[in-house]
Amino acid sequence: MSRTYELFIGPNHPGIPGNFSVKLELEGDTVVSAKGDPGYLHRAFEKSMENRYYIQNLALIPRICVPEPDINEAAYAMAVEDLMGVEIPERAKYLRTIVLEMARIAAYLFWMGGFAATLGLYTLSQWTVGDRDYALDLFAELCGVRVYHMYIWPGGVRRDAPPGWEDEVLAYVRYLRDKLIDYDNIFFKNVMFKQRTRGVAVITKEQAIEWCATGPILKATGVAQDVRKDDPYAAYEYIDFEIPTLTDGDSWARAMIRRWEFENSLNIIEQAIKKMPKKGPVWTKMPNPLKWRVPKGEAYAKVESARGEHGFYMVSDGTERPYRVAVRGSSHTHMFTIAERLLVGQRLADVSHILVSLDICPPEFDR
């Protein structure tokens, strides 16, 4: 008689951060083995991009990670600009930075609520989803849509910010800074949160490097790695901010890194709005987008997402369509290299918050 049994979590499950499944083998309530089961969300993004004009891909790529779509727009645009030798205007650099940090904030609000819900703190998930909606309203005012913005594109951004928008963003930043006190009191300083996450699912610095961890997972082990600092893009070279690190490497440390990253984003937005040129072009004039013929060559462009390094590798054969596009989403290694190892030996009750602590975005590997 077998001492173990199988349990499927997902693809549609409140404890799964997206449309994928994890097959668990358990003995009692202890995980013996874990296997990621993708394929529920496959959309063939990369192959589809090779069959569309460069400009048409702007409507496709934001869907590679729904909670934070703008990272895909930025990396894609930077790869095209690299191949074409295009430099974007100064004001566009700052607008890109503001949009990317707002997208990071929206993603972290979604993440905070999801993490709290795995521990039974449903009040925070109600608050953060509501507060995220204010960010979506600002995106709608900027570019006409709430979720898939198609705002960052090769040459800069699609259009300038409307009058008064920057002041509205600053008001939103002030609002979130006040709300962060409430988030701390109900969640991050909560004794139950600490008891459930301290010392759980520990990753050492050596393991994080060996397993190709990036973003908050890597920072939680003491490695201060961030694309915004190491290889600045947009206007990040003009912005002053520190990279938060911890050495605990557990579920608690990964959560706290994201909490500090959230506060960092608020500071970055304030600086970017203050330093941004008040006037000037936001797009480098280019030919008719349907006539773009990108010179032959290859390029890799990367940005820092809420989950870590996110990149686009692009090959051009000189025609109006990309010859090859490959997306490097950090969720691939975070799920299939890290989560499958990290879940072994953990209790069933902790599986969901461990997965959320890794902040896995399924379209990044089901692409």
Image (cartoon, rainbow, N blue to C red):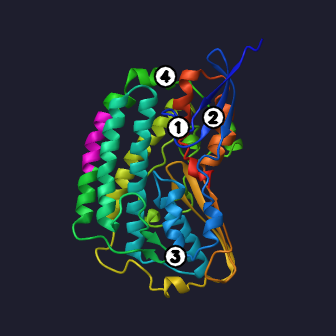
Main SS type for the magenta part? helix
Which numbered disc covers residue 195? none
Residue 253 visible? The answer is yes
**Closer to the camera in the image, 352 or 174:** 352
Which region shows up in magenta? 174-183
Residue that numbered label 2 is attached to: 22
Across and down, in percent, residue 136 comes to 33, 55
Q: What is the distance, in whole Å, between disc 4 and disc 1 at their CAs?
A: 24 Å
Residue type highlighted by circle 4 = Arg
Query: Is 192 situated above or below 116?
Result: above
- Judge depth for marks 3 and 1 and give the one in front: 1
Residue that numbered label 3 is attached to: 55
Q: What is the distance, in whole Å, between disc 2 and disc 3 at their CAs?
A: 36 Å
Q: Is residue 175 magenta?
A: yes
| Mark 2: few/some/many CA within 10 Å (<14, 14-19, 20+) | many
Secondary structure under the numbered disc 2 in the rendered image: strand
Residue 170 found in image quarter: bottom left
Residue type highlighted by circle 2 = Val
Query: Is 281 situated above or below 19?
Result: below
Across and down, in percent, residue 360 comes to 56, 43
Q: What is the distance, in whole Å, between disc 3 and disc 1 at their CAs?
A: 33 Å
Secondary structure under the numbered disc 1 in the rendered image: loop
Q: Is residue 274 magenta?
A: no
**Closer to the camera in the image, 158 or 95:** 158
Residue that numbered label 4 is attached to: 196
Residue type highlighted by circle 1 = Asn
| Mark 1: few/some/many CA within 10 Å (<14, 14-19, 20+) | few
Residue type highlighted by circle 3 = Ile
Q: What is the distance, in whole Å, between disc 1 and disc 2 at their CAs?
A: 11 Å
